[in-house]
Image: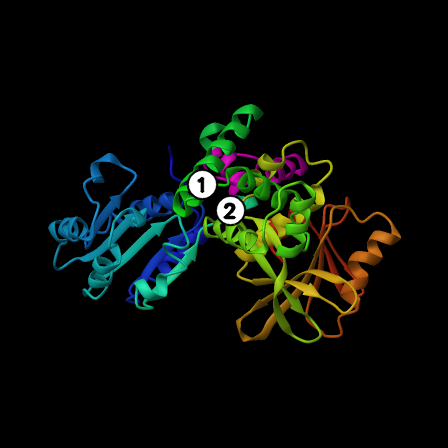
Amino acid sequence: MEIITREYYANKVDSWLGKEVIIVLTGQRRVGKSYVLKDFVLRHQQDENTNIIYIDKEKRQFGFITNQEHLGNYIDEHFVKGKHNFILVDEIQEVDGWEHVIRSFRTEEETDVIITGSNSKMLSGELSTLLAGRYEEIRVQGLSYLEFLRFHGLNDNEDSLLTYLNYGGLPGLRLIGLGEEEHVWEYLHSVFDTVMLKDVVERHNIRNITFMKRFITFLADTVGKINSATSISKYMKSQQQPISTNVILDYAEYYAEAYLIDMVNRYDIHGRRIFESNRKTFFGDVGLRNMIVGGTREGDIEKVIENVVYLHLLRLGYHVFIGQLQVGEIDFVCTKPLGQRIYVQASYLITNDETREREFGNLRKINDNYPKFVISMTPLVSRNDDNGIIHLHLRRFLTEGLGV
């Protein structure tokens, strides 16, 4: 299959070359980390001054590399002095003791190391210790809306947007095709089953499979809603399945480690404090979220839009929180280094005064001059200025960003 360059990740990876850091690509299974590596090979292999050592642990030919000795020997055999060596290892968590070898080769002159892994506890949660702090982690997400259009050869219109909101952005759908809905859902189901089995059940030796499935369904159904472990425990008890808050917190962490979900903290706008309780949950891919809950999007389009807006804000480089006012809530408080901040509300349609007051009114309660946005699918809206609050159509936001 033709490899399409994802410029965002290509540029980000290239920007860290030659800086003596280990580049680590993390993210949920099947979001395209392997293809970012393959694209890197295609973009750099023509340079006669480079030597690329590429190990793909999902291929049988590399099955013999199971520990640090095998890994070190293979790299030594293919290392070329006098050239710039690029060491690429895909799914490195399959190699026992990999960190010792990777740390060693990072110190070699004219050498860059790029690795990928699917599980954040293996990588993200322990990287600082494993790699002695000399690394740059790049989280790979599913396709953005613009990438989705390019991968599937679609035009930017309302039908394409609705397809994206329904099926999500896993790159593998390009091979499956979007013509047969049944095939799409079967593919998404197979990805979900693999993530749950490999990165949740087997990794954490899960025994309560019934609760595991029920809990992830609950989180999918309550996307964008503030939950606490206590409230979830009470709900489960009402469903004749008593589960302690500690177990709920553990399982939520397992899903987050597998990049199925993000748990987003609240930010007290007036007090400028971050709270780690009563968080919102968003899914790393809305297609998987939609597959889990089933049905159509008619009843939960608001949740899907909020999830998609959240993911795109991450792509734009923001740290994202849930905004807490003394009375009311702001969907997203987004920050960048050097004090940059924006506020964002996500909605489906703003067609009456009540909805307008809910979305715009809360933003007007914030007494500062940082940019404020409402993003919706309201017809005839492209980019309107409503007394200093920018109302953006979702398609424009996903194709052009915020314009700040």
Mark 2, secondary structure of its residue:
loop
Q: Nearer the viewer, residue 282 or 383?
A: 282
What number is the disc on residue 125? none
Q: Nearer the viewer, residue 177 or 154?
A: 177
Per the picture, the main secondary structure of the magenta-coloured stretch is helix
Chain part drawn in magenta: 147-173
From the top left corner, tell me how far across and down residue 64 is, in percent: 18, 40
Residue carrying label 1: 195
Mark 1, secondary structure of its residue:
helix
> What residue do we see at 27% from left, 37% from top?
59
Relative to residue 268, is residue 284 drawn left or right? Answer: left
Q: Amino acid at mark 2?
A: Leu
* Quadrant in which residue 295 is drawn: top right
Q: Amino acid at mark 1?
A: Val
- Report if residue 381 is visible in the image: yes
Residue carrying label 2: 260
2 or 1: tag closer to the N-terminus: 1
> What residue do we see at 53% from left, 72% from top?
337
Q: Are marks 2 and 1 in contact (CB under 8 Å)?
A: yes
> What residue do we see at 47% from left, 35% from top?
193
